[in-house]
Amino acid sequence: MTAAPDRKELISRLQKDILQWEGYKAPASGTRELVGLGPVEGAFPNGVFPLGTVHELVCGNTEQATACGGFVSGLLSVLMQNGGASLWIGLSGNVFPQTLKVFGVDPDRVIFINLSKDKDVLWVMEEALKCAGLAAVVGEVREIDFKQSRRLQLAVEQSHVTGFILRNWSNKMGTTACAARWKIKPLPSETLDGLPGLGFPRWQIELLRVRNGQPGNWIMEWSQGRFKPVSKPVVKHQELMAG
Amino acid sequence: MQKRFMAIWFRHLTTDWLTLKQPELKDLPFVFAAPERNRIIITAANAVAEAQGVYRCMAAADAKAITTNLQVLDHIPGKEAKLLRQLGLWCIRYSPIVAVDLPDGLILDISGCAHLWGGERGYLKEIVNKLRASGYDARAAIADTVGTAWAVARFGKKTPIIESGMQAQALLNLPPIALRLEPIILEKLQKLGFSTIKSFMQLPRTVLRRRFGEGFLLRLAQALGLENEHITPLVPPVPYAERLPCLEPIRTAKAIEIAIQKLLEGLCTRLQSEGKGIRKATLKCYRIDGKLVQAGISTNRGSHSVSHLFKLFELQINKIEPALGIELFLLEAYRVEDVDVLQEKLWAGNPGLQDTALAELLDKLAGKIGAHAIHRYLPAEHYWPERAVKEAASLKETPATIWRTDRLRPLRMLREPEPIEVMALLPDYPPKVFTYKGRRHVVEKADGPERIEREWWRDKGEHRDYYAVEDTSGQRYWLFRLGHYDAAPQWYLHGFLA
């Protein structure tokens, strides 16, 4: 009868091991917030944003793809803190390097690769993810299927590089082997005391799917070089007009 | 090391070429002729015509009187140079330094090359036989100096190979014309009864200089090896190169791999000892059908790592078509740079742009997708958005100025601004509504205008007034109005803000 608790212990230990292999490291003391996402990080297993895995961001149009780009750049700024370099593999090649500096990324430490075919992007991405010296790899594709995402996931398990896939203009939502699926949408910004002009970029961050975690929905702003959660509900323009 | 030169003489260069092109001319006497001082002078005669007594410099009319069925063809200016260039390029498989010797010869610097063909005799036989088999009547000679080799190839009666230091003996019985002298000096020598070189070689130099000039003495000294003579190579030799001649023609991919590995091992050992690394290299494969196939690689940082360079060439192997077989491999590193070995050790494993693994990754990517797809940008001191960033030349280049963040710029900028239709309340106000790609956007918030003037010293045109706008759903755009608002200005969408 003594076997029962042992088995439970064994299973929980194995589960922890699996989590670690998949890139979810147990939090070290004093490093609670890994990427500065605040409450969002609580949705992940152990409450830690998984590095060394592949994240998938779904964007329906160019505006959303731009918001995704901003969100990813914000994460890159943390990942590249120790002087690392990253690769941005684009389909359109229209990322304006100077703006990355606003999101805390040194644009001269990002290498841009412009390609036109999904196949090439995925090949380059796989090769890049195998290279342990990189901080992160961002790849823009139209479509990715389960097999291709598995290949990327296998590549990062060796090298512990973090990968971001921006699925632009995709209409199918097949299963992938990615650790998390995000959807970033732009939201109307707010200025102090209703002054004219544009406020800080504000996004609706939806965590649609996350392995071993809790999907959720947050509103974040990029201000003063970091993510800032917005708790206040946004008053819609239409409601304002109606009221 | 003692220099050795080989002179090749094509006795019937242009006529052999025409015979190859039109085989029916093989047994007919024909000559090339060109007008000179109101006469038609023969510039080249084929072997059949020569056998019947027709020679160069003869008037075509006289030749026709001797040979009834003589065909006189128009001389093709510049043909010799073209043919010699082709033959010279073919000869590069025997020696890296080949020079064209107009009007009818080639000079090869063969120092240290002949042992690969089992000595000079075998080497000379190989070249002459190959040339004769391809239809060119060639004679060749090897000597310590260009002058002696030239003379023996054309006028030598005994052996074509002159041992080192035996130039004087070889030249003794040859006519003065063998010294490559000007016609006016030759005429003088003939008048004075000097029919062989022997007859004037021992005369005092002062006497010879007074009668025949400095040029004459120079030619004599060059032939004897007392003066240096430089030749201009057809293809400038690459300082870092490695050759691999094959005993049997190579046809398989595996054999090509072995060849590349061998060449790289040789070259990289040398580069490493000199502290250099390859930036650009070409593998040239000489095929037995006379064609040349090549594959090139380039790296982001100088490298002398055999395994890395081999990986880059491995991606190119499928582009090398061996056809009937490859007989010579030539690996040329035509761009090398200094590699600081110590520094490499220091940076290895360090994240960042100086990481060796990153440089090797980029080389690999460039080999597959092309280097034009890979970009790295640096800030440039321009307000004009299209010029605000510039391409970095290498991974090492660091920004000369800071990245500016004081102005609002889009995260995604269109390559070409796209025209939009707008409605603005007042001419200099931001638009209230705009239509982009058939979709209507109602502008809720706006910033601007930010006027950016054109750089008048670069291009002409109107200035742009930029507005950053946000529509009702929070999507942000970067728009501009081209020029002043007086005469129905055109609006454009230039980017998307995050």
Image (cartoon, helix red, strand yellow):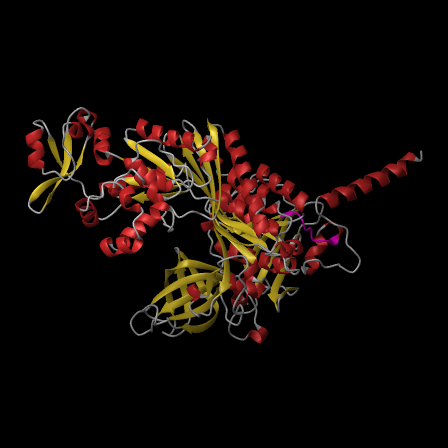
Q: Is residue B297 above or below residue B141?
A: below
Q: Is residue B310 above or below residue B379?
A: above
Residue B14 as seen in the image, left or right of residue B254:
left
Question: In the image shown, does A166 or A125 lie closer to the viewer?
Answer: A125
Q: Quadrant of residue A149?
A: top right
Residue B110 as seen in the image, left or right of residue B302:
left
Inspect the magenta stretch and tell me whether residue A53 lies in it. yes
Q: Residue at x 50, y 71 (%)?
A: B407
Question: In the image shown, does A14 or B125 lie closer to the viewer?
Answer: B125
Outermost residue, right side: A1
Q: Position of residue A79 (x, y in %)?
A: 65, 57
Q: Is residue A152 above or below residue B214?
A: above
Q: Position of residue A239 (x, y in %)?
A: 55, 64
Q: Main secondary structure of the magenta part?
A: loop
Inspect the magenta stretch and tell me whether residue B186 lies in it. no
Q: Position of residue B227 (x, y in %)?
A: 37, 51
Q: Position of residue B299 (x, y in %)?
A: 52, 49
Question: In the image shown, does A105 or A174 lie closer to the viewer?
Answer: A105
Report if residue A59 is visible in the image: no
Report if residue B438 is visible in the image: yes
Q: Is residue A167 above or below residue B126?
A: below
Q: Which residues are magenta?
A: A47-54
Question: In the image shown, does B77 or B286 lie closer to the viewer?
Answer: B77
Q: How many marks?
A: 0
Q: Residue at x 30, y 44 (%)?
A: B101
